[in-house]
Image (cartoon, helix red, strand yellow):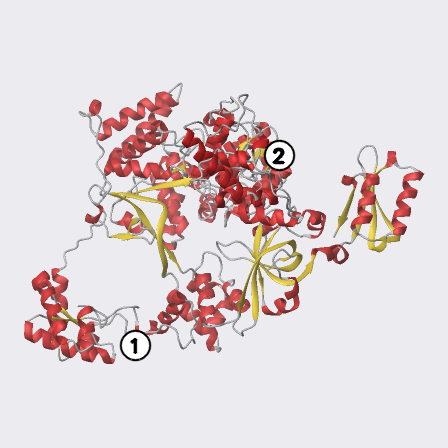
Amino acid sequence: TACIHGEIPTKIIQGDYQSARQTVLEYQEIFGDDFYLEVQNHGIPEEETALAGLKKLSRELNIPLVATNDIHYLKREHAIPHDVLLCLQTGKDYDDPNRLRYATQELYFKSSDEMFQLFSDLTEAIENTLEVAEKCNLELEFNKFHLPQYELPDDASEQTLDEYLERLALEGLRWRYSEITPEIEQRLRNELNIIKQTGYAGYFLIVKDFIDYARKKGIPVGPGRGSAAGSLVAYALGITNIDPLRYNLIFERFLNPERITLPDIDIDFCYERREKIIDYVKKKYGDKNVTQIITFGTMAARAVIRDVGRVLKMKYNEVDRIAKLIPFGKNLDEAIALVPEFRQLSESEDETYRKLIDYSRVLEGLARHASTHAAGVVIAPAELTNFVPLYKTNQGDVTTQYDMKCIEKIGLLKMDFLGLRTLTVIDNTIKLLKKRNIEIDIDKIPLDDVDTYKLFSNGETVGVFQFESSGMRECLRKLKPECIEDLIAMNALFRPGPMVMIDDFIDRKHGRKPIEYLHPSLEPILKETYGVIVYQEQVIQIASKLAGFSMGEADVLRRAMGKKNPKAMQQQLKRFVEGANKNGIPTNIAEEIFDLMSRFAGYGFNKSHAAGYALVAYQTAYLKTHYPAEFMAASFSSEMGNTDRIMVLMEECRRMGIKVLPPDVNESFTNFVVTEEGIRFGLGAIKNVGKGAIESIVRARKKHGKFQTIFDFVQHLDLRLVNRKVLESLIQAGAMDSLQGHRAQLMAAVGTAINFAQSQQSASLRRQTSIFDVVEDSGKRKVGKYPDLPIVERWSPFTKLAKEKELLGFYISGHPLAKFEEELQAFSTVSLEALNSLQDGALVKVGGIITSIKTHHDRNQRIMAFVKLEDFSGSCEVLVFSDAYEKNQGLIKIDSMVMLIGQVSTRENENAKIICREILPLTEARERFAKNVCVNLNFEDINDEMLGKIKKLVQKNKGECFFLIHLINGDQRECLIRSQKFRVSPQENFISQLRQMLGKQNVWIEG
């Protein structure tokens, strides 16, 4: 009957005993002997009232009592941390007198002794808890798999699942290889034997079935991800598209007979059509047998420190500093053990620090929220409610209540159906090429294309899958990759941990460091990675080849090394040395090799996964290299709605020399398209313009040709789909600039245009004739028949841009910062897009335009601000604390163009922020930061007249900057001359005059 807030106790407390009695009788009729009256004692006064009434009801109606305790936390000492958690959930401070709080600290998991003591006069209520437990019927079966039944087709009805799988695999092998060597066939047989031994033939057939469905429906499927790419059977079945023999991938890394667990084939699908695959699986195996899996957002170490610090009203900077003492990937207990300063704080005499860390240790790891896992899908052999509890999300989706790990433990089949945006980009690029009658099979492009590797080597990889971060681009410029193996290695190395090996890897590739092997047997295994252990598969191969481990045993060794279990490692070392000795390798060398393996096993990456994703990366780079406009258009379309990504892509197009044209009702479609002039914006990128409206516009344009005026445009549209708001949004985004009149006129004419269109459409219905009677027989529109546009003043350039920003999320016809482009290039230490590549605490100088401001009172009731700053490349959040806010308040305004000095603040899994120190207007940046005015002079072009003009200009524009002359002779060798006599001003007028004389590219400013 629940706690005091339950229906029956509430009525008793309210004094309505008879109503409570009637309710009890109703429940007793429904539940019979399974109905109990629940009594509790947390020291809350109302409970005594409820208890008296419940005891009376028990006596009168002969209904048993059962004693319980509300459990909100595990231990008595967790009461205060739980109170802190309530503050986090409600957004309140701990010392807020009006916040939610519980009236007792007794809401913990009490022992049987404590419960007997609480209810010493009601021992039967305690004993009844055992009766309730015995009535519960639940068995959790572990180490038993519950796989859905795969139905064999009619032509295989006499075969077993293993036989049918073998048949398909052999057929697939003939499809994959022109010549099947004994080695290839033996590898397949070995894999099939392991699959038969583990009983997973049905699993492979289930996966093949829905991948076949996807390919049949034209839904892009990735070439392979995770360890499944190491399976020849998966390759033969068409599950993966990576040849494991070509890339030397290992099956046992995927399915190990020495360590039997459910296989895990993760599949990438086009992100727009992933749901189609899930719907197909639900239809095939039963809607009640298939659902998505829950995931829990938990309170990680750094985050919980920050959250608790906020509740305790500690200073932001101090809490942020403490949080950053915790190494990435470590929990609080590990941080106490590893970081002396953090340990000192946990033992500090200052109670505030002790509370911060003590409360955080209790709350760390707790689930903060639940949501649907991005990829996980579970398929059961019967209704899921027979195996797992279900949960309904806030969005109305049904998921499991168990997360991925628990699903695996109870033996249910888990699949990862990942929506990969890049596959959609590749597919849409190919579709755009087809419109130009260019046919391309992405799976058959050459993997040795020189120009593609040149793009990688130049670091021009914005938009290239997994290779576009600024840090990765810098590594590529150093590496100069020449083959797919280089890309696989870089994909594996560019991660926390193995990143420390990148420079060594690059130096070995370019011969700056020798490639050395502890034993000649290592060379065939490590040659492709220049003697560096990069992959987990290499650890497996070393154990197998040098020490005689089976592949399965070697994978067990790899896992033991990754976990750093000292006892297990010692056992494995002994076994490894013995095996190596048998192969003629001395003990000291064997021990060195084992030590090398163990050091890199924790860093080593799954080569199968790296190979699959490196192949996708190469495909995108190939398309960008050879079909740049189509590739960038497809990339834009995939990112509609993501303003920051669109800005990055626009900046990249500008670098590539590809024009990005504004949306246009006479040329645009839903998505971005390629025209003779460049890339035309999609109408789908405009806010308030829906799919139906776009279809109406495209349909009318196709039938009647290009529109000439707003009246001509509107009269042909379905006004149920294209309403006033849609029209105004199109105008403000610049999508109607190709019609007569300017934007202000078009905006003022919207009402007239709609009335005109309605009257024309009504008249045509009455006459039962075409609504296009205003068009001459020749098909040319009589513009004179339309109303006149109103005479109104044009919008200012700034107003135009502001409205574009409002409707598109960014500027398209220009940029407010355009006149300060030189200042941003000369004085910014980093672009905002590249901010994430900097280390925490780095000092930066950045410029941009303020696009949003949120003010907030800090703990001392002083105003601080969260500011969004944008430049050409992207945006970032700027934290302006109270001291900086008071000094710079006059500049912190929407649309202010500023230069900002500050410090980078990074957090795990978040974009970098800037903590502001100083702000100044961009108009003052030259005077403040310019140090040199530089010119290039070609020795052959210099004459007295030129030098005289330059000298005259320099004398007229005196200032504080050095005047530097870069003197270049015929073979491009350079000599630098710095004027000792003249100092110059960096102002625009002087720079413009120099550029008129010497050319724009030969004059620049340095900060």
**Label 1: which secondary element:** loop
* Residue 475, image quadrant: top right
Against 183, residue 499 (above or below) is: below
Residue 658 is marked as: 2
Percent from the top left, x then y, of residue 189? 30, 28
In the displayed structure, does residue 959 sit left or right of residue 479? right
Percent from the top left, x then y, of residue 749? 56, 43
Q: Which of 761 and 628 is in front in this view?
A: 761
**Residue 519 shows in this picture:** no
Sequence-earlier tag: 1 or 2: 1
Q: Which of 585 and 978 is in front in this view?
A: 978
Task: Give the residue at the far top of this rendering.
Answer: 178
| Label 1 vs label 2, nearer the camera | 2
Residue 31 is marked as: none
* Residue 100, image quadrant: bottom left
Query: Residues under labels 1 and 2: Cα distance?
Result: 67 Å
**Residue 454 shows in this picture:** yes
Q: Which residue is drawn at 74% across and 57% down?
A: 924
Percent from the top left, x then y, of residue 231? 36, 33
Against 353, residue 381 (above or below) is: above
Q: Residue at x 90, y 43 (%)?
A: 949
Residue with the mark numbered 1? 104
Q: Which of 586 and 94 is in front in this view?
A: 94
Q: Residue at x 56, y 51 (%)?
A: 836
**Label 2: which secondary element:** loop
Percent from the top left, x then y, of residue 433? 51, 26
As shown in the figure, which amino acid type bears the numbered disc 2? Ile
Q: Which image quadrant: the N terminus? A: bottom left
As shown in the figure, which amino acid type bears the numbered disc 1? Thr
In the displayed structure, does residue 695 sit left or right of residue 486? left
* Residue 878, image quadrant: bottom right
